[in-house]
Each structure stands twice: as structure tokens, then as C-alpha cells.
Image (cartoon, rainbow, N blue to C red):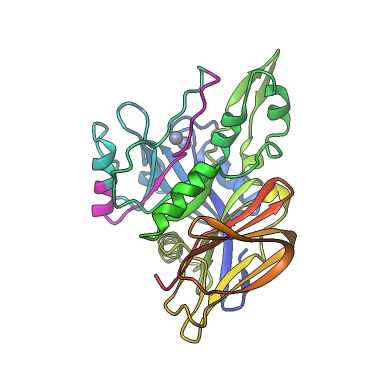
Amino acid sequence: MGRKIGDWHYYSGAIHVHTTESDGTKDFEEIVAIGRDAGLDFIMFTDHMTLSNREQGREGLYGNLLAVVGYEHNAPQDNHHYLLFDSPRVYPEDLAPLEYVAAGAADRAIGIMAHPDEIRDRLPEYPPYPWKDWTVSGFTGLEIWNQMSEWMERLTKYNKLLMAFSPRKSMIAPSDRVLKKWDELNATAKVVGVASVDAHAFVQKVGFLRVQIFPYKVHFRCLRTHVILPVPMSGDFETAKGQLYDALRDCRVYVSNMRWGDADGFEFRGESSRDAVVCGGELSNVDDAQLYVSLPERATVRLVHNGQKILQTGTDGLEYRVSQPGVYRVEAWKGRRGWIFSNHIRVGV
Ligand SMILES: [Zn+2]
Ligand SMILES: [Zn+2]
């Protein structure tokens, strides 16, 4: 269930979920039931190169859970994975990244680069699938944090057992590389940053054991994407779906690792004499702009301006008088573990 803070309504969910329609290990209905138990407000399904769950009419509201179906497109060489929502169809398999990103933009679909910063090279059986072609245009956003991807990046022959048995604790934070890229992109345009679970619930061999890494229910209690709506989520499916997609397009989004605390109650707002906004918003006036952060509990808060950390303090809330135009975002850390990462507020840009 959503939570109201001030004039805004907050919801959290899981993005990038595979089912048995591609390489996931549970079917749509089973995963929806697990998501409801985990208290998700929404799930965004993305099987590889198929919209079959949507075509079979499975999208909908299941109690309070909104389930929408997009898909994960990949280039013929199996790189440049791209999540597409609200596209009329699955685009042809032989398109280059430039072409399927453009096709999504032409259809006003939501396009999100999946795990753009993978670099792992230690385990030949798990090659990286990074995003390389940055000449593309018309994408909506990127995954700043991908649960399966971070887990794989940190995996070695030696830590496999520990990583397999405490997968949530092994999450640290989005990489500096992806945050840098995201800040650069936001200097000139709004680009949403989301956290993805990339759930398959694969079974792995660890020594003599067969272990299910990240069962769906563990995935759903780890990385979450939170969206902020101006009115409560509708009880009508089509309306609710539109509200979720609009929040993503507007960057009214922050992400969290639930392992370090429930991030419901986090706020990043901006105010000037002319406007009052939440993350994703724009303040036209620098002169009297003020930023506000509040947290459900104390953490180390960093304020980032145009990619540079300008303030760091242990607190459960802060106010900041803006003096420079640019894009601002907030990070909250628990020790060396990243907890909450907001999208940007744009001031005078
Ligand atoms: Zn992928
Ligand atoms: Zn995937």
C-alpha cells in the first residue's frame, strides 16, 4: 500500500523480472503471489524478447499489486540489453541498438538500458553484457543498480559460498562508473535511474550443493524502485499503469536496498517562491531555491551537485540553500553500504 507524505503518494516495486516465458524459474501467477506477500505495490515483468504474458492478458491489478509486462530486448550479439515498456510489439531481432532504441522512442515506449556497466571477467561462464554504444538517443533511463549484475560482479571462486547464502548482504552500492555516466547524461536531459532485481531465481552449483540464488521472495526484499505520484494509484488498471509510467518518465523515482531498512518515508524535495517539487522536478529559480532531505532513520547523507559530492553528514534530515544552478541528487549510506539513491532535482537548468 502506498504512503502519503505531504501532497505526494509513494509506492515501491520490483523492476526487471523474468518468468518461465523466458529463462525465469516460476510462472507469472506464482511470482505475483510472492510479490503480494513481499508487500510490493508493483512488478514490472521483462522476459527476453517476448510479450507473451501481456498477449495472454495477464497484466492487471492483483489486489493492491499492479503487474505490468514489458520485455528485454537484446542485440544479435546478445549485448545492449534494453527494457521496453509500453511498446506496441517486440521489435525485430536483427535490429542494432541504435535502431531498437529509436523504434521505442518513435512509439513513445519507455526504454531503460539494463545493466549498462557490467565489466566482470573472472568467470568465463558468466560473460558481461554491458552497454557500449552511447550514440543512441531517445532512451528514457538506465539501471543504476542491478541486483543480479552486482552479485555476479562480486562473485569469485573463493567467495561463492558466502555470496550464495547471504545474497542481500553482498549488495554494496551502484558503481561509481554508472553514477558518473548517469550524472553526465542528466546535465543535458532528464534520464531516469532505476534499481532492477533482474530476477530469474537460477539454481547454481556451490560445491556439492545446488542452491537457488535469490529466490524471488529474497529479490523482492532487496533492491526496490520507489515512485512518487501526485494522486493515489488508481483502482483502474489502465489508469494505474499510466501513473506508473508517467512517474518513470518524469524521474519521480528513488531506489533503495531494503536490507538496510525500509526506505518508505524518504523525501527529497525542492522549493522556491515559484515551485515546489519532489525528485525528478525542476526549480526554475536559483535565487531562492532550497532543498530538503528527510529520512526514516539516521544515515550518512551525501548531496551530489553535477556529479560532485558537495556535502556529507550523518543525519536524519537536512536543508540546503542552493547557490549554483545544476542537477542535485541525494545518497544515503549505512556505513559502507548504499541504502537510498534519489533521482535528480534540476535547478535553473
Ligand atoms: Zn539482461
Ligand atoms: Zn534480465
**Residue 147, horizontal then vertical, whole percent:** 57, 39
Q: Which part of the image, by quadrant, shows the N terminus?
A: bottom right
Any magenta on residue 222? no
Q: Looking at the image, which is closer to me, 312 or 203?
A: 312
**Residue 308, horizontal then vertical, whole percent:** 53, 56
Q: Is residue 40 left or right of residue 89?
A: right
The answer, for residue 15, to whether it is visible in the render is: no
40 is higher (above) or lower (below) than 5: above
Q: Which part of the image, by quadrant, shows the C terminus?
A: bottom left
Q: What span is in magenta?
A: 102-123
Q: Looking at the image, which is closer to me, 64 or 344?
A: 344
The answer, for residue 344, to whether it is visible in the render is: yes
Q: Is residue 13 left or right of residue 258?
A: left
Q: Residue at x 44, y 39 (%)?
A: 116
Q: Looking at the image, which is closer to me, 128 or 262?
A: 128
Q: Residue at x 28, y 44 (%)?
A: 135
Any magenta on residue 104? yes
- State the residue lying farthest toward the bottom: 273
Number of labels in the image equals: 0
**Residue 342, horizontal then vertical, whole percent:** 56, 59
Q: Residue at x 61, y 39 (%)?
A: 216
Q: Residue at x 57, y 72 (%)?
A: 269
Q: Quadrant of residue 49?
A: top left
Q: Looking at the image, which is closer to me, 73 or 192?
A: 192
**Residue 133, horizontal then vertical, whole percent:** 32, 38
Q: Is residue 155 left or right of residue 232?
A: right
295 is higher (above) or lower (below) than 44: below
68 is higher (above) or lower (below) than 46: below
